[in-house]
């Protein structure tokens, strides 16, 4: 059934296409499910178990040190090659022979990379978590965390190996299809989480959710896109000009440093609070961050779903079309983020005013406000970064490193001595002060890269 004229006008105004619709539905489900999960965690987990639950995710963030941002790099590289290929009725791609050979070579590189990364991450993350929780757990703690942690570390390593397949599909323009399967997976994993908590399996709920997600992803990839990947693996790559060291690594290492910086900026807070303020405070921060990230994920959908198309426009040199799409999308995304942030803040204030028992499972309203403020700043920087990375460049590397150093330091110092409120306020101040520099770099690079070849910039050898 086709949408009516009024609905079509609304969709055009808001920028909602099929890809965004599925992603937003997935994020909306995550938000609604998050409320139910909040109730389930508060009802079925003790406050100290809640702290372990969210700290598990933060420790697993160490996987980023092995993934090194390759999935994002891969998506951009695939989008540049897919610009010269078309889909066939058999679910494979045809067209420019060189582009297909390069695509096949990319897949082989990705599988070798992620196979190694999955094994190394399991070998490192598993003992790191065992040591951390053993040393940081309160004396006489009765939380059963060892078996859940071992299972979760193993399942997460397998999930890491699946990353390049989704990056290949998104880079090939199948953003809507990937978003749909993620929505389905999100529904099934939420149901499995609630069931596990209801059954009293406590921290085992976390690895159960990951295992359900792996199973859904594997079935969908094999049944729906098996021909695509099988065809690429059968495509010969002898003589294919794909120099990983010269074409991919110069972009990837910059992305990887930015991704590593992201860990110190976003995942370090909960382990620090767990270590110095206890699992209860860590659980409050973990649940609060989860609420903020749910809103963030909805807003990011507007830009992240357009990233492959940005890469296509850059590959074809259609910079005016790129700018029109990006700035329209940026305005829509920021409007959505602002409205969601306001709604969350009002909900937290209402919980405190009415004396709801759930207010004890999240941070104070002032601390929550700092978390929302930082989220809005981070998203703005992310949007500008997506635009720049579509050119297979990472000019924000220096800013990312500086922010990581400052935020990581403030997280440790403020989190240790001033708790959640000091940590959130310090981090917000740092990222806010970095925004003028990020905007300046964005403006300069956009002007430089999109200038006609005959334009000469003073003080530069760019012609």
Image (cartoon, helix red, strand yellow):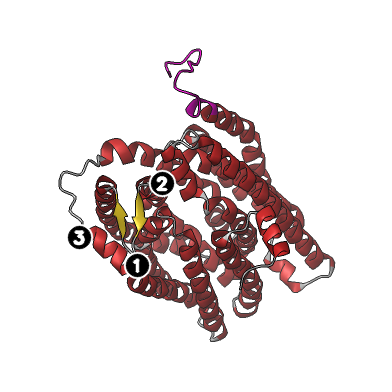
Q: CA distance from mark 2 to mark 1?
A: 20 Å
Q: Position of residue 221 (x, y in %)?
A: 36, 69
Q: Earlier in the sequence, mark 2 or mark 1?
A: 2
Which quadrant of the rendered structure holds the N terminus?
Answer: bottom right
* Left or right, 32 with reference to 256: right
Which residue is drawn at the image coordinates 31% and 62% (left, top)? 92
Q: Is residue 273 above or below residue 396?
A: below
Q: Is residue 242 above or below residue 190?
A: above
Q: Earlier in the sequence, mark 2 or mark 3?
A: 2
Write down the residue under mark 1: 225
Q: Earlier in the sequence, mark 1 or mark 3?
A: 1
How busy is the neighbourhood of tag 2: few (under 14 within 10 Å), some, or many (20 plus)?
Answer: many
Which residue is drawn at the image coordinates 38% and 59% (left, top)? 163
| Element at label 2 | helix
Q: CA distance from mark 1 to mark 3?
A: 14 Å
Q: What residue occupies the far top of the structure in this picture? A: 458
Magenta stretch prevailing secondary structure: loop
Write down the residue under mark 2: 76
Q: Is residue 79 above or below residue 89?
A: above
Write down the residue under mark 3: 234
| Element at label 3 | helix
Residue 91: give its label.
none
Which quadrant of the rendered structure holds the C terminus?
Answer: top left
Which residue is drawn at the image coordinates 41% and 38% (left, top)? 254
Between 389 and 272, the one nearer to me in the picture: 389
Report the magenta residues as a range: 447-463
| Element at label 1 | helix
């Amino acid at each position: 059934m086709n949408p009516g004229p009024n609905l079509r006008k609304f969709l055009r105004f808001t920028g909602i296409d099929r890809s965004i619709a599925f992603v937003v539905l997935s994020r909306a489900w995550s938000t609604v499910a998050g409320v139910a999960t909040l109730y389930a965690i508060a009802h079925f987990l003790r406050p100290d178990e809640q702290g372990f639950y969210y700290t598990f995710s933060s420790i697993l963030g160490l996987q980023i040190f092995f993934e090194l941002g390759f999935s994002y790099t891969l998506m951009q590289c695939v989008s540049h090659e897919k610009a010269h290929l078309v889909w066939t009725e058999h679910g494979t791609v045809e067209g420019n022979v060189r582009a297909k050979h390069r695509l096949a070579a990319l897949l082989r590189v990705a599988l070798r990379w992620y196979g190694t990364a999955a094994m190394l991450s399991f070998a490192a993350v598993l003992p790191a978590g065992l040591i951390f929780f053993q040393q940081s757990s309160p004396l006489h703690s009765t939380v059963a965390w060892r078996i859940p942690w071992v299972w979760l570390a193993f399942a997460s390593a397998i999930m890491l190996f699946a990353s390049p397949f989704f990056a290949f599909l998104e880079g090939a323009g199948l953003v809507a299809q990937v978003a749909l399967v993620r929505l389905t997976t999100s529904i099934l994993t939420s149901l499995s989480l609630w069931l596990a908590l209801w059954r009293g399996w406590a921290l085992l709920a976390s690895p159960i959710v990951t295992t359900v997600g792996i199973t859904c992803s594997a079935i969908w990839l094999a049944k729906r896109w098996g021909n695509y990947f099988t065809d690429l693996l059968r495509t010969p790559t002898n003589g294919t000009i794909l120099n990983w060291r010269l074409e991919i690594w110069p972009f990837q290492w910059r992305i990887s440093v930015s991704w590593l910086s992201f860990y110190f900026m976003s995942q370090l807070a909960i382990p620090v609070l767990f270590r110095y303020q206890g699992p209860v405070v860590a659980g409050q921060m973990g649940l609060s961050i989860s609420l903020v990230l749910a809103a963030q994920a909805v807003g990011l959908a507007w830009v992240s779903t357009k990233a492959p198309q940005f890469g296509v426009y850059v590959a074809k040199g259609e910079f005016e079309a790129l700018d029109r799409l990006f700035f329209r999308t940026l305005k829509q995304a920021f409007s959505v983020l602002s409205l969601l942030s306001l709604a969350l803040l009002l909900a937290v204030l209402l919980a405190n005013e009415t004396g709801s028992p759930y207010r004890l499972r999240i941070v104070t309203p002032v601390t929550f406000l700092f978390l929302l403020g930082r989220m809005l700043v981070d998203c703005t920087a992310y949007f500008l970064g997506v635009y720049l990375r579509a050119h297979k460049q990472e000019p924000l590397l220096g800013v990312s490193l500086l922010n990581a150093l400052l935020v990581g330091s403030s997280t440790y110092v403020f989190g240790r001595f001033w708790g959640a409120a000091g940590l959130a306020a310090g981090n917000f101040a740092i990222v806010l002060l970095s925004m003028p520099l990020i905007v300046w770099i964005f403006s300069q690079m956009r002007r430089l890269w999109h200038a006609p070849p005959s334009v000469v910039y003073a003080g530069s050898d760019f012609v």
